[in-house]
Image (cartoon, grey):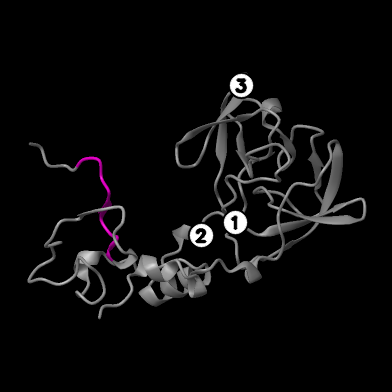
Amino acid sequence: MGKRIISRRRGSGGIYSAPSHKYKADVKYPKGDNVSGVVTEFIHDPGRTAPLAVVDFNGKKEFMLPAEGVTTGQSISIGASFGHGNVLPIGSIPEGTKIFNIEGEFGDGGKFVRSGGTFATIISHGERTVVQLPSGKFKSLSSKCRATIGVVSGGGRPEKPWAKAGKKYHAMRSKAKVYPIVSGVAMNPVDHPHGGGSHQHVGKTSSLPRGAPPGRKVGHIAPKRTGKVK
């Protein structure tokens, strides 16, 4: 009897669940407009690739993703003025400006572009605002959605080499990511339906019906057509 394939094992959670206990706080924009606060300190968040800024809004502390260059004691405004590290509706931000922590819908607190060192760019304004994400994809959003001006702090992490596989394994494990990623044809027959053989090849059809059992469901699932030309 074979083992469960990795996609089947991941569906059960366990060590593949998100490390929610590592997140220091739920990072969202404070409610209200025309409010300002002061950055009191920066803290490390093990579950993120960017540090967190603790911002004091008239006695109420909020956690925010800081922009590169923001310092302790600096004033941060929400919906008040254009400035590095400030938060404004994307419809009020000039074209070509770098932004991050963009709301998908007004009031959701920020959903896009939150990793350290990343940024999106304002492309155009109209009935909706077009933003280019770090992936290069263009996304049309409501002009009321808010974003922070600048680049997410904490960039440069990928520039340091891992040096050995074990370092990367433990780093990925801490964020519930799978490493190393091994192709099915490189496995043994007991580990994957594509495994085994005298050389690396699938050895059977990789197109499967929709109703195939979970342990067999790898490859092309119920494809409308294959690459074979008749």
Q: Earlier in the sequence, mark 1 or mark 3?
A: 3
Dot 3 falls on a residue whose secondary structure is: loop
Nearest to the observer: residue 222 or residue 11 = 222
* Amino acid type of the residue that numbered disc 3 sits on in the rendered structure: His
Residue 155: x and y, percent? 55, 54
Disc 2 marks which amino acid? Arg
Tell me how far mark 2 sits from mark 3, CA to CA.
33 Å
Span shown in magenta: 216-225
Q: Is residue 162 left or right of residue 107?
A: left
Report the label total.
3
Query: Is the stretch drawn in magenta largely helix, strand or loop?
Result: loop
Q: Categorize mark 2 by other alpha carbons within 10 Å: few (<14), some (14-19), many (20+).
A: few
Residue in the picture at 30% in, 52% down: 210
Numbered mark located on residue 126 in the image: none
Q: For mark 1, give the secondary structure.
A: loop
Residue 5 % position (x, y):
32, 70
Disc 1 to disc 2, how far (Cα)?
Answer: 7 Å
State the residue at coordinates (82%, 44%).
Answer: 31
Residue 218 is a magenta residue: yes
* Helix, strand or loop at mark 2: helix
Q: Earlier in the sequence, mark 2 or mark 3?
A: 3
Depth order, front residue of 59/227: 227
- Residue at mark 3: 125
Quickly name the residue at label 2: 157
- The answer to whether any part of residue 2 appears in the image is yes
Q: Position of residue 222 (x, y in %)?
A: 27, 48
Viewer-nearest of discs 2 and 3: 3
Tell me, for residue 154, which label it has, or none.
1
Query: Quick one: quadrant of the N terminus?
Result: bottom left
The residue sitting at the right extreme is 59
Amino acid at dot 1 = Gly
Seen at 10% across and 37% down, the residue is 229
